[in-house]
Image: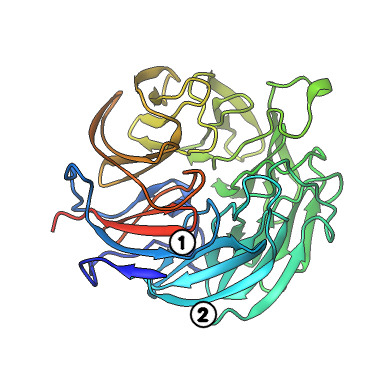
Amino acid sequence: MKTQISFTCLLILLAATLPLHSQETSIYEWRGIDRLGIYPDQNLLKAWPEEGPALVWEYEGVGNGYGSPVFTPDNKLYIMGEADSLAWLIVLDHNGQFLWKKDFGNEWVKNYNGARCAPTVAGNEVYVTSGMGTIYCFNRHNGEKLWSIDMVNDLGGEFPLYGFSEAVAIEGNRMFCTPGGPVHNVVALNRFTGELIWSNPGKGERSAYHQPKVITVGDQSILVTFTAYTMLGLDTNTGDLLWVHDQENIPPEERKPGSGDTHSNSILYEDGFITYVEGDGNCTVKLALSPDGSTITDVWRNTDFDSYMGGFIKLGDWMYGCGSAKPALRSLNTQTGEIGSELKTASGNIISADGMLYYYNFRGEVLLIKPDGPNMELISKFRITKGQKEHFAHPVVHNGLLIIRHGDVLQAYQITRS
């Protein structure tokens, strides 16, 4: 059920979400442009009223889940949810009005039941992945099913302890996913037909809840993804394995599902360097790539900056993200790998827009934070009271609205100055 709150329509002359990888096909996906969590909105409030920003609309009925919505410029948002053990793709307009929905098989209900990830939209298609490992491609305008594949039954994949949680990556006519397992560990499928283009056995490990990314180094296009104890770099055209980067936190004889194998955050690639952040594995590491992308070398490591699944933000020379072993929001110098400061709060998920940090913690608090190099100042906060289960979904900023998902409820708050 959708409830309109006060301002019926909020029209901001701002692009919804910008195209990401391909100049020919616009791609809209988890955490926005290049999966960085930095949204292009401007003229946003620098402080909120004590009770929080005004609620513009809410929609109750997106189903159980933790995945964020994805917005497209044609007045649609796409979000996934679970209801009655089924996986659903739900489509609303930008004012929270219901348009249509489609089910795509069984959803994960063994633990933390609900949809795990965000849809990926490319051109006229939308791609969704259930926790059970089924990938569906729909016509994003009318919900017509175009193709589907089961990563376990069709590709020999292996279930992670908490189900699959991967928002697929797109480049050109290829769609990339990580079934895990000894044969089709990482694959590229024709995104229009679902046919296998290439397959690589990787290290034969399980999928690791990771959100893969395509980067370009010189003339080389590289898919960067994680499996349980390894980061992999693969040629996107051929599937050849270019390099591997081991996670050294768990000795091989102690490795098992749920033990040090969660690598949820998408990597950052900038100026020839990869930086990744995680709670498991090596925590935070900066790597230098060779000019042709064929090799990697360590630059620095930090084990105190250990965001488990909350993402991280880079502004200038500083990164910001939550701690897991010792919960707090921390800043980190990207040149040296040293911690700058910390702000006491629970673990959570972080995004940025208009120079501010937005932090939605696992206690249900939404914090507005002003970053200043190593320092962070808490400006305002309010609490999410509607919805149920864990506060795990990453927030989104779109057209002057702060979008928060808590379980079955999606809410939009006005954060523009006018």
Residue at the image position 48 percent from the left and 39 percent from the top? 311
Residue 7: x and y in percent read 20, 68
* Mark seen at residue 7: none
Figure quadrant of residue 182: top right
Residue 97: x and y in percent read 38, 74
Identify residue type, mark 2: His
Above or below 255: residue 209: below
Residue 298: x and y in percent read 59, 23
Residue at the image position 86 percent from the left and 48 percent from the top? 183
Whether pointer 1 and pointer 2 mark residues with C-beta atoms closer than 8 Å, the reply is no
Residue at numbered disc 1: 70
Location of the N terminus (image quadrant): bottom left
Looking at the rendered structure, the secondary structure element under dot 2 is loop
Residue at the image position 76 percent from the left and 41 percent from the top? 206
129 or 96: nearer the eye?
A: 96
Residue 258: x and y in percent read 71, 33
Q: Earlier in the sequence, mark 1 or mark 2?
A: 1
* Residue at mark 1 to residue at mark 2: CA–CA distance: 14 Å
Residue at numbered disc 2: 141
For this orientation, the residue located farthest to the left is: 418
Above or below 302: residue 225: below
Residue at the image position 67 percent from the left and 77 percent from the top? 146
Question: Mark 1, residues whose alpha carbon is within 10 Å: few (<14), some, or many (≥20)?
Answer: many
